[in-house]
Image: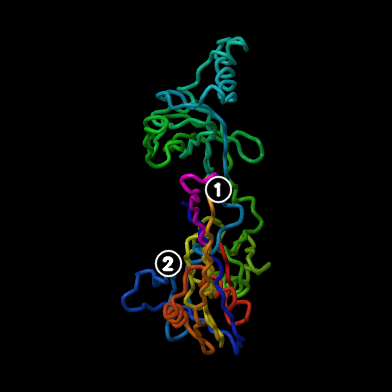
Amino acid sequence: MRGIRLRTGVGFRAGLGFRAGFGFRAGFGFRAGFGFASGFALFGLAGTILIAASAAAEVTDDKVLIRDVASVEGIRDNSLIGYGLVVGLRGTGDKQQTYFTIQTLASILQRMGVEIPPSVVQSTVQVKNVAAVFVTANLPPFARPGMPLDVIVSSAGDARSLEGGLLLLTPLYAADGQIYAAAQGPLVVGGYAVGSAANAKQVNHPTVGRIPNGGLIERDSSLDLTKLQHVSLLLNDASFTTVEEMAAVINHELATPAANVIDSRRVEIETPVPGNANLPALLARIENLEVRVRRKAKVVVNERTGTVVLGGDVRLGAVSILHGTFSIEVTTTYAASQPNALGSGQTVVVPETRVKASDSPARNVELNEGASVEELVTRLQAIGATARDVVSILQAIKAAGALEAELEVI
């Protein structure tokens, strides 16, 4: 006997939304019983995690350091990648059908002066103690030869675990194809895998390991600040308001119009600045200046996990929400139909299908102009909205023009 159930449908209607203006609130308050030190409140909503930052009663400016909202153009990390072998595994390496592992091992042995006939390589070489891996690292700014790097080693084949392995000397390349570092050393793996087939146990992810200070920089990639004619600061989040405020703060601090706004993300500073011939000292002085930042109102929704994050400056327009539930349940059972004891019929399986439909009355939620996040959360809790309901309702409110914030679904 087997039952098949299908449920469909969550219906609602969003009414008209009217916006009379925009409200911005930078301060954060706390809701009793749900407060956290970070200024966010956590709400349980019928299987949904709803995080909201409640706004303060008065509009205030959020002052942050320039180094927290901007970076210097050209001073950044660079990604490195390499391909190599991990040896010394305890039978948890790649299998024989992973041909590139055997090929790499034969190539390394050939460079060491050990010749292996191709027929032997393809038929008899076992690589259970060897694993082909990719090695990645980040090259920091102003890196000099001899500086150590942390590297991450990830299995490229079908190895079960890299526990106890040793990475052989592996060159690390940048996007330009040049070698900038080399890595070698024993792996630190935060997990293990033991057993085989149905009788096995695995903890964490044993096919990825780390080698602290396992890489050494071999090529100088530092930026020569003395040759720069100008320095550009790049905002992490584009904003004409913030970039203009940043330029004004820098010019006021330097007492000269050295900073110019290029676009909504970039501020260009001419060098050398009178009285500031030392560029590192100038940048240290600038990055510790405070600038007023007005955060963008934003709502982030993760439908997979049912998480909704709303900033405290999110405001709602006047809107009416009708929320109801319509469900159809189809159940199929299979029964055996047998003939009489002396009959000439056959035993057959007969499906029995039952259909049940239910429609709950629509529940109404009305929000006035300028409604806060806390009011929205309270109303949604009252009507028992689920995770998918919340996502759909927020999208409908945005479509109706009553959500004064950017809606991002991840």
User: Is 273 in front, or is 280?
Assistant: 280
Considering the numbered disc 1 on the image, is that residue within a helix, a strand or a loop? loop
Residue at (40, 33) in percent of width and height: 198
Residue placed under numbered mark 2 in the picture: 47
| Residue displayed at 46% across by 24% down | 87
Where are the magenta residues, as a range?
331-345
For disc 2, the neighbor class at 10 Å (few under 14, some 14 to 19, many from 20) is some
Q: Is residue 99 above or below residue 274?
A: above
Three-letter amino acid code of the residue under disc 2: Gly
Relative height, residue 340 to residue 57 (above, below): above
Q: Circle 1: is it few (<14), some (14-19), or many (20+) Cα within 10 Å? A: few
Left or right, 381 with respect to 222, comes to left
Q: Earlier in the sequence, mark 2 or mark 1?
A: 2
Q: Is residue 180 left or right of residue 229?
A: left
Residue 111 visible, this orientation: yes
Q: Position of residue 245 (x, y in %)?
A: 57, 74
- Res 286 visible: no
